[in-house]
Amino acid sequence: MKIAVFDTKHYDRQALTLANARFGHELGFFEPRLNTATVELAAGFDAVCPFVNDRLDAAVVARLAALGVQLVVLRCAGFNGVDLAACRQHGIRVARVPAYSPHAVAEHAFALLLAVNRRIHKAYVRVREMDFSLDGLVGFDLHGKTFGVIGTGRIGEAAIAIARGFGMRVLACDPQQNAALAARLGFDYAPLAEVLAHSDVLSLHVPLLPATRHIIDAVAIAAIKPGAILINTSRGALVDTPAVIDALKSGQLAGVGLDVYEMEEGVFFEDLSDTGLQDDQLARLLTFPNVLVTSHQGFLTREALANIADTTLGNATAFAAGEALANEVLPQ
Ligand code: NAI
């Protein structure tokens, strides 16, 4: 198939080109994100391959259909950027990469947690400035503390296994409880309110859905155990950023590690070092010494990139062969 790959960076081209040696699709790489301004780039292609911050709203989907695009092969797990109803209306099928390396994201959640808790980001800068003092770097033992998990799917499971390895107690909430998993990894399910109240660390591993948007808002934050650390590697809009800023100011949250941010589109993945930030909320977040923000890099391991490329191109091959699309995303 002729596939227009949007929002591509060097590592995307590398992984997709390498995997494509086995699939033989015709790939066109474009740097811009797919949106109303760039949709014409899809002319002449059978499929588009967007990433997390491309916006396939109703207008873009209608234009893609008019251009003859039949398939959307997302090279990510989340599909909140695609208007699925519009795709169905225009007969465009949508497939994603449901799992590529849950370990990549879970391990990154712990990288953020360890760095925020032990102030590694501050220590790194201090030591490079020949400042070997320790004031302000005090953290807490993870061992014996409670790790609260919202969402016990693939990534939540991997995060729980790591937390158990640290000797943490784990409390989790998920409407789809997996008793066998809880018994195997040794954790307890509890209602959200209980998870919030008892966790020293709270890690979010739910998809962005209407029901999970701002699941961490001012009300939820008020119910969190004072002095907890919040980690979000899932989707930015799971948390209400102004409420998180207030909680950092008051000390209700002792630290925050974010790999995602509600308004990350157009900021994350870009080099803005010459232009600066227009977003005052993100700028405020970056002023806190106990906040660490990474630019949506949870997926960025060699293993995950290779798996993403394989599944994405395999989805296109299955579609072209008229086979069942195992990774199809249908309107809810
Ligand atoms: P999954 O589909 O395996 O698990 C999600 C779990 O959340 C399910 O068990 C579901 O029942 C649960 N859930 C749904 N609504 C809930 C609610 N209201 N409260 C508690 N639990 C709820 O998804 P997976 O693979 O674990 O991924 C989770 C999220 O991680 C993705 O949706 C995506 O947004 C994010 N992600 C971030 C990446 C990054 O680079 N930072 C990379 C990959 C995924």
Image (tube, helix red, strand yellow):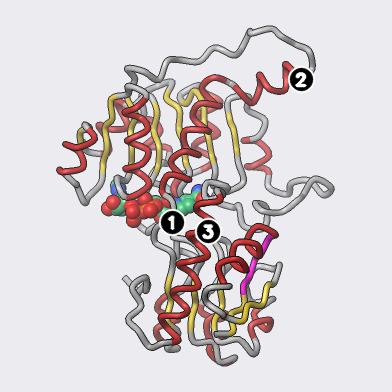
Q: Tag 1, which secondary structure?
A: loop
Q: What crowding class fits label 1: few (fewer than 14 Cα within 10 Å), some (14-19), or many (20 or more)?
A: many
Residue 236 shows up from this direction: no
Q: Tag 2, which secondary structure?
A: helix
Residue, x 60% and y 86% (percent of image)? 45
Q: Is residue 8 magenta?
A: yes
Mark 2: which amino acid?
Arg
Q: CA distance from mark 1 to mark 2?
A: 36 Å
Quarter occupied by the C terminus: bottom left
Disc 1 residue lies near ligand 1 with CB under 8 A: yes
Residue, x 84% and y 47% (percent of image)? 274
Q: Residue 2 in the image: x percent, y percent?
A: 59, 84
Q: CA distance from mark 3 to mark 1?
A: 8 Å
* Predominant SS of the magenta segment: loop
Residue, x 62% and y 68% (percent of image)? 17
Q: What crowding class fits label 3: few (fewer than 14 Cα within 10 Å), some (14-19), or many (20 or more)?
A: some
Q: Magenta residues? A: 5-9
Q: Which of the 4 image quarters holds residue 47?
A: bottom right
Mark 3: which amino acid?
Ala
Q: Residue 79 in the image: x percent, y percent?
A: 45, 65
Q: Tag 3, which secondary structure?
A: helix
> In the shown orientation, is residue 137 left or right of residue 278?
left
Q: CA distance from mark 3 to mark 2?
A: 35 Å
Against 187, residue 209 (above or below) is: below
In this view, the mark in front (3 or 2): 3
Judged from this view, the residue extending furthest toward the front is: 22
Whichever of callouts 1 and 2 sits on the residue coming sooner in the sequence is 1
